[in-house]
Image (cartoon, coloured by chain):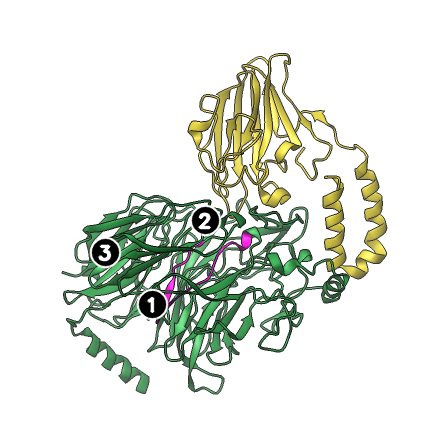
Amino acid sequence: MHKLMRPVVEQLRFLALNNQRIFSYFLLPFLLATISACSSPIKPSVFEPSWMSYDKQKQQVNIELVAAWNANNNGYNFNGYFLDDITITVPADWLVNMTLINLDANAAHSILITEPYTDDIPDELTGEFAVLHRAYTDSVYANESAEMKFKAKAGDYWIFCGVKGHAINGMWVKFKADKNINTPFIKIQQTANEIRY
Amino acid sequence: MMKKYLLIASLLFNTSVSSEPLEWPSYGGELGQSRYVNDASINTQNVNQLKLKWMFQTGIVGSFENTPIVKDGVMYVTTPYNHLYALNARNGERLWRYKHKLGTTIYCCGPNSKGAAIAGNLVIMATLDAMLVAIDKETGKLVWETTIADSEQGYSETGAPIIYQDKIIIGVAGAEYGIRGFISAYDLKTGSLIWRWFTVPEPDQIQPDGTKGWTGVFAEKANGINDLHRNIAAEKEAIASGEFDNAWEHGGGSSWMPVTIDTKTGIIYATIGNPAPDLDGSLRPGDNRWTASMVSLDSQTGKMIWGYQYIPHDVWDLDAASPPILTTAKNKQGEDAAVAVHAGKTGWVYVHDLKTGDLIRRSDPMVEQKNLFARPSYGQGTEMLPGANGGVNWSPGSVDPLTHTVFYSNLHQPMHYEARSVPWRKGRLWLGGAFKVIPGKEQSGNVSAVNLDTGKISWQYKTDQPMIGGTLATAGNLLFSGESNGYFFALDSRTGKKLWQFQAGAGVNAAPMAYRIDGKLHIAVAAGGNAQINAPRGGTVAVFSIE
C-alpha cells in the first residue's frame, strides 16, 4: 500500500472501531474528501522548515530535531520523519549546530552522523562511531536536550539514533553536505506523513 | 485492643537478638514475596546508628534493579548484561564471577536483571537473550543452560527465576515486540521444560470462567467501576470480520516479574503485562485476556485456576507487573482471610481472595488520576494520569502482616498517549503509538502505606522524583526504600516519618533485602540507577548494620 495512504486507512479503521455511528454518518464523507486531497502532492518537497535557520555570512545552520515529535514509527522519529522520509542538505564546510530534544516518555534517544548504511544497520552506536568530528550527542532522556556542533565535510550521511535497537527500527534520516549549494534546504519524500514543517 | 497487645508482644519478642541465621534465598525473601523481616533488632529507636558495613562495586553500569539473595553466608548479585557475582555476605569479598555470553538481545527498558535463585548446589539466572543458566554455587562454573525462547523475535528475560521444589518457574518479557507471553516450569537438575502456560489463550481454549480464547466478556468497566470507554459493538464487528483472527499470536502478555507461590498449596500467583501493540487496540478487538491480569496456576501442571483482569482491552500500557504478595487481610465479612495483593500502574492496591481471585477491595488511589481511561488519540494524543510507568511500576511492595499494611513506591509522570497503527514485524518495536512527556509538567513520587483491611492510605512519604525500586518492611517498625537521587532511607512504618538516610552515590532503584549473619541483622540494597527514569547510574551493592 502507498505509504501516504496506509496511515490514513488505518486511522479510518481506528475511528470506525471507536466511533462507529459518528463515523458512518458524519466523518466518512469528510475523510473521503480528505484522502482525495492528501493523495495529491500538497506538501512542498523542497523548502526551508520552521525548525531550521541559517546565517549565510557566518556559514552556520541551526537544526532542531525533536525525538518522538509524534507517534510516527512508534515514536522513533525526528520531527516526525524516519527512514528516508527526508534529506537535510547543507552547504559543505558550514558549521552545523544540531539540537536534539527528547519528548519520548519511555526511551532515551541520541543523534550522531554516520555513513549511510546499505546492508546491516548497527544495533547500537556511541559517539566514537561518528564519521564527522564531534558530530554526536550522548543519550538524551525524556524532557532533556543536547547539542552537537560540527563542520559539515562534503558527503552523504545519516543522522542516526545510536541507542540500542532504535536505528534498526527506522530511527534515522538522511543528511548531506553539498559543495554546489549556498543555502540549506530539506527535501521531503511525498510519502512522508504527519511531519513537522 | 488485642491487636495492640500482639504488636507490643511481637516487638518485645523480636527485639531480642537471634543468633540464628536469617536468609533471603529468593527475590522476595520468601516465596509469598512479603519482603517482611521478622527481626526488630534494628528499630525506630536505634536506626540512627545504622552504618555502612561494606560495599561492593560491580563495575557494570547500566540499570541496576537487582535484589541480592543470601544463602549459607554467600550473597549472589546479578547485574545489567547478566554478570553474576558470589560475595562473602560478612564482608563483601568477591568469591567468583560468572558472565553470561549474550547472543542477540532485543529488550525493553534497559539491560536489567532482577536477581537470581538458589537451590541445592545451583544458582539460577535468566538472561537478556532469553536463556536460563545454572551455575555451580561453589565454583561459579556453568552446569547447564537452556533456551527459553527465540531472542531474535524480541523475547527476553529481565526478571528473577523462582525455585519451588524441583522446578524453576519463570515468565518472559517482550510484549513491546509482539511476542506471545507465557510462564514455564523447568527441571532444576537438567533445565528441561516441564510445562508452559501461555498468557494469551488460543481461540478455542476454554477458560476457567467458561469463555473461549482471549476475547473475554467484553467488559465495559475496570473492576466493575470505571468506564473504559470501549466501543464494544465495533470490536465485535471487527472480530466477526475475521480480519483479526490471528491477533492472539502476537498478543503480548509478558509475565516479566517473578511469580509468587503459596507453599501450603503449591499454587502460583503471577501478574501479566500489557497486550501488543501497547496503544493500538484496533488491531486486537476483545478483552485481550489474560493481559493486564493476575492469574493463579497449579505449579505441578501449569493448569490455570483463576484469572482476574484489571484492564480489559488495555490501550495505556497499564500492565500488571509488581509481584503478588500473599498475606492476611479482612474479607468482605470482616474476617481475617488469606489474600493475594497487587499494586497496579493504575495507582490502586487490589486485594483478592486467594482461592477464588475475587476482588475483595480496591484501595484509594496512591497517585493522582486524571482523565482516567480516556482513549489514546491521533494527532497530539491524550493526556491521562497515571502515565504508562504508573502508579506502581514493577517495584515490589512489602507488607507488615501484623498491621495488615502494604508499602509501595509510586510515580507521578504526566504523559500524552498517542496512537498510530503499524503492522507487526518480527523483532521490531511494536507500540502502536508513542508515550510522550508533557514539557513543563512536574514529575514526582511517593511511598504509600495502605491499610489492606480498609483500602485507605495510612500515610504517604513524598519525593521530588518518580520512584522505581521497591520497599522492605521490618518488625522493628521500619520501612526501607530508595530514591533516584541516591538516598537510601528508613521511615517509621507506622507514620512515614524519615528516621535515617544514606547517600549511595547513584540512584537507589532496586528493592532492598535483609539477612542475619553472626547474630546481626544486615540491610542490603543495589544502588546503580535506572534506565527508564534516567536515575544516575552506578554499580554498588551497599550493606548496612549496627555494630
Badge 2 marks a residue whose secondary structure is loop
Q: In the rendered image of this protein, which colour is used for chain B? A: green
Residue named by callout 2 = B532
Q: What colour has chain A?
A: yellow
Q: Compared with residue B532, is residue B351 higher up or lower down, i.e. above or below?
A: below
Q: Closest to the observer: B328 or B185?
A: B185
The residue labelled by disc 3 is B543
Q: Nearer the viewer, residue B176 or B143?
A: B143
Magenta residues (range): B157-176
Residue B35 numbered tag = 1
**Crowd around label 1: few <14 · some 14–19 · many ≥20 (10 Å):** many
Asked whether, in this view, residue B441 is left or right of residue A81, the answer is: left
Callouts 3 and 1 in the same chain: yes
Earlier in the chain: of badge 3 and badge 1, it is: 1
Disc 3 from disc 1: Cα separation: 17 Å
* Same subunit, tags 2 and 3: yes
